[in-house]
Image: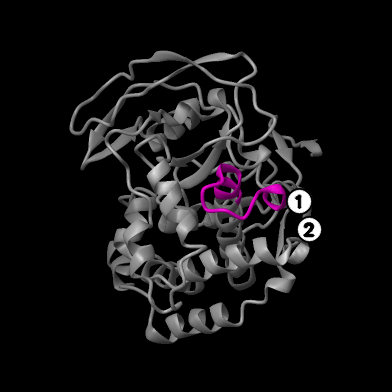
């Protein structure tokens, strides 16, 4: 992957090499299509993509993305109560006419998935399926938003000392528009992942230092804690390993075998597209109290990412965190940014 230095002093990455979706053989392609169809037929997918088409978020959805500032027009934000039936119908029509022959997928992901046995029990198949489906959902969201709202937001890596205008559709830990191939518009892809899958889906890529600290303890609620760490070995992988979910506020959770098995079944179970009950029970993925978690600060150290351009060091701020309203909220970014400018 080519790297280009921009004048922020950071490094931005070029997009990964891609191939047409039907580079996959029929057996593998059919499973991806089956899972993708069922996910896009869910109520949360219809609502989320329709809000993306409108370019507006409900108050509840906006509060999940960012803080409401005192100077904002609260009444104006509250006016939008959700997409109209016409907008939902527009998305349904787009979904039914979605032409996969124009879809590009990451070449490395396609090759790995192609080599896997088409079996629900195959770990390589499970990870490859998840990787491709999530990436296709991400890219679809970016494409729709870019087509409808590119006049307002930059669609290339942001350069320059001034702050980029970021869309409200965002995951609070994926805001580095200067690193992303589509710049600020890329944020909507991470938002869509969060809406449909609970968070951004990342994979283990290992740590060249060999041994790292992780937090194996479940999340605590209503307490301010300092993460306690234990040492476990991490292998320096050449291929992506186990999948994790990077939640907006609760850290990063390693997906359980049960969750991954259930997701894989979406590609094998025959069910009408209109019947999304089974998918809705599974997605978005929920935080599990007995699962393994690490702090968002540690994504870089543990090599937890999906694309190389997402692997950037965390900011040098306090690792203390506290919970509010049942969510693990880190030191307020807006205070830190404001003090930096003062």
Query: Can you identify the residue that label 2 sits on?
Result: 19
Locate residue 242, reporting x and y percent. Answer: 53, 36
Q: Is residue 194 magenta?
A: no
Examine the rendering and report whether any part of residue 169 can be seen. no
Residues marked 1 and 2 touching at CB (< 8 Å): yes
Give the residue number, with chain letter if any, for mark 1: 107
Quick one: 19 or 84, which is closer to the camera?
A: 19
- Is residue 76 in view? yes
Q: How many marks?
A: 2
* Residue lying farthest to the left in this orientation: 222
Q: Mark 1 to mark 2: distance in Å?
A: 5 Å
Extreme residue toward the right, this view: 2
Q: Position of residue 5 (x, y in %)?
A: 77, 34
The image shows residue 148 at horizontal and vertical percentages of 59, 73
Q: Quick one: 240 or 199, which is closer to the camera? A: 240
Residue 54, image x and y in percent? 47, 74
């Amino acid at each position: 992957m080519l790297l280009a230095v921009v004048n922020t002093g950071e490094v931005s990455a070029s997009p990964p090499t891609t191939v047409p979706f039907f580079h996959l053989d029929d057996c593998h392609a059919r499973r991806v299509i089956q899972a993708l169809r069922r996910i896009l037929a869910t109520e949360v997918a219809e609502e989320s993509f329709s809000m993306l088409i409108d370019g507006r978020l409900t108050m509840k959805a906006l509060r999940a993305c960012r803080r409401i500032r005192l100077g904002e027009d609260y009444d104006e934000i509250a006016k939008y109560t959700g997409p109209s039936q016409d907008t939902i119908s527009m998305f349904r029509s787009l979904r039914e006419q979605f032409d996969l022959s124009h879809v590009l997928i990451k070449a490395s992901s396609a090759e790995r998935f192609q080599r896997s046995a088409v079996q629900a029990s195959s770990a390589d198949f499970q990870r490859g399926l998840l990787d491709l489906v999530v990436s296709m959902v991400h890219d679809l969201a970016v494409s729709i938003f870019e087509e409808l709202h590119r006049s307002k937001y930059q669609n290339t890596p942001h350069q320059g000392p001034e702050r980029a205008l970021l869309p409200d559709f965002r995951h609070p830990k994926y805001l580095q528009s200067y690193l992303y191939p589509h710049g600020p518009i890329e944020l909507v892809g991470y938002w869509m992942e969060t809406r449909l899958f609970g968070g951004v889906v990342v994979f283990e890529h290992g740590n060249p230092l060999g041994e790292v600290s992780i937090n194996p303890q479940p999340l605590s609620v209503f307490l301010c804690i300092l993460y306690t760490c234990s040492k476990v070995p991490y292998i320096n992988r050449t291929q992506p390993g186990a999948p994790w979910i990077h939640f907006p506020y609760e850290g990063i959770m390693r997906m359980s075998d049960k969750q991954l098995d259930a997701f894989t079944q979406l590609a094998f179970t025959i069910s009408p597209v209109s019947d999304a009950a089974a998918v809705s029970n599974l997605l978005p993925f929920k935080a599990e109290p007995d699962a393994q978690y690490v702090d968002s600060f540690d994504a870089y150290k543990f090599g937890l990412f999906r694309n190389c351009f997402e692997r950037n060091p965390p900011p040098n701020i306090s690792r203390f965190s506290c919970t509010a309203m049942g969510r693990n909220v880190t030191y307020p970014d807006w205070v830190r940014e404001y003090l930096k400018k003062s």
